[in-house]
Amino acid sequence: MLIEWVGNFHSHTRFSDGTATHLRIAEAAAQAGLDGVAVTDHNVWVKGLQGYYGEVLLLVGEEVHDPCRQPQVNHALILGLGRELAPLAASPQALIDAAREQGALVFLAHPVEHSPGWLQRRMGEPPLPWVDREVSGFTGLEVWNTMSEFKARLRTPLHALYYAFFPARFLRGPFPEALRWWEQLWLQGIPAVAIGGADAHGHAYKLGPLRRVLFPYEWLFRAVNTHLLLDQPLPREPEADWAVIRAALQAGRAWVANDLLGSSRGFRFEARSGHRQATMGEALRRAGAVRFEASAPLPGEFRLIRFGSGVVARGRGRRFQHLIAEPGIYRMEVYRRGRLWILTNPIRVE
């Protein structure tokens, strides 16, 4: 039986450009109801702080990029590393290769970004996408980054003021370009894993006379998270637990959810054919027709998507079923209140 584990794999402390300590981040994760959280400070790997803080497992990774490159594009989230890798930032492929040699996982952070002109001029916030797309060997893409989406939604200063008071309203879903890139990777035979992250810093923003922390850590940890399905219980020993979490992440037994629209704990997406079945991140060999099944803890609009073809079936409610006969790569999206709630990793039907 698979066990659900909910975490956020992108946050920053005072060791780089965040405002909180590791302890405070773990406390915020606990208050948000997470099982775990990863600190990924910029170009600094902090030893000795990984472990359990109460009921929350705090993982220490790193967000590596080249500070000498302008703009500072190509940010890599590295989880499970055993030594500092920032000196390799100038060569993204060498960085990925070195991380893999350590058994670490590498996700391309905010792979697509947009920043309005006024925000670049007045706030010094350029877009920082991943531009070197010829790299190989990475684990996956951070397809949904909360702060990247916020930045892109600020078309004018008035939008910034509006979202300062109604922050949940800017979250609509990943950029279409990021989803297209992810789909293209799969169609090219590269099984890239999709995750989502907060990119939490806890910064205070100033616009005219207003100054406020728009997105406290706890708020961000209640928003876009990554839900994993573990193949065994965690023994509550940090290194052993990371091995179990790593296996689920690498396999793609995961979905991304905007949990502000309602907790997605308990969601499932599976495919069955004959006596065989598969879940997210797995392959299913057909024995006749294939029945896709999904269930959600709250009502929503289900969309079954076949990579390369688009939406092939829709449904409403808490449960979804659909029969297909074609092989392919299939994923599920679920919407609530007209906004994307859940985005799954795919199931490959062979």
Image (tube, rainbow, N blue to C red):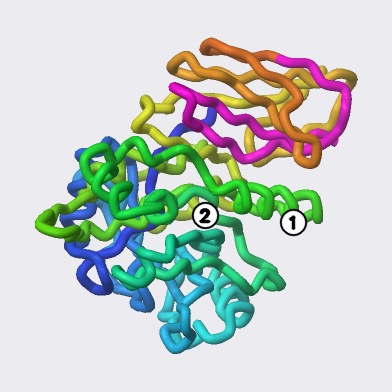
x and y, in percent, of residue 143 in the image: 54, 51
Q: Is residue 332 above or below residue 223?
A: above
Task: Examine the rendering and report whether any part of residue 40 can be seen.
Answer: yes
* Horizontal arrangement in the rendering, residue 91 relative to residue 232 (left or right): right
The disc, 1 or 2, on the residue closer to the chain's N-terminal end is 2
**Magenta span contains residue 346:** yes
- Snapshot quadrant of residue 307: top right
How would you rate the neighbour count of disc 2 (Cα within 10 Å): few for under 14, some for 14-19, many for 20 or more? many
Q: Is residue 186 above or below residue 315?
A: below
* Horizontal arrangement in the rendering, residue 308 relative to residue 50 (left or right): right
Query: Disc 1 to disc 2, how far (Cα)?
Result: 15 Å
> In the picture, which quadrant includes the C terminus?
top right
> In the picture, which quadrant includes the N terminus?
top right
The foreground one among 233 and 259 is 259
Identity of the amino acid at label 2?
Glu
**Tags 1 and 2 in contact by the CB under 8 Å rule?**
no
x and y, in percent, of residue 68 in the image: 44, 89
How would you rate the neighbour count of disc 1 (Cα within 10 Å): few for under 14, some for 14-19, many for 20 or more? some
Q: Is residue 167 above or below residue 335?
A: below
Identity of the amino acid at label 1?
Ile
Q: Residue at x 63, y 14 (%)?
A: 315
Question: Label 2 belongs to which residue?
Answer: 142
Q: Residue furthest left?
A: 209
Q: Nearer the viewer, mark 1 or mark 2?
A: 2
Q: Which mark is residue 208?
A: none
Q: Main secondary structure of the magenta part?
A: strand
Question: Label 1 belongs to which residue?
Answer: 190
Task: Examine the rendering and report whether any part of residue 204 can be seen.
Answer: no
Q: Residue at x 45, y 74 (%)?
A: 64
The stretch in magenta equals 322-350
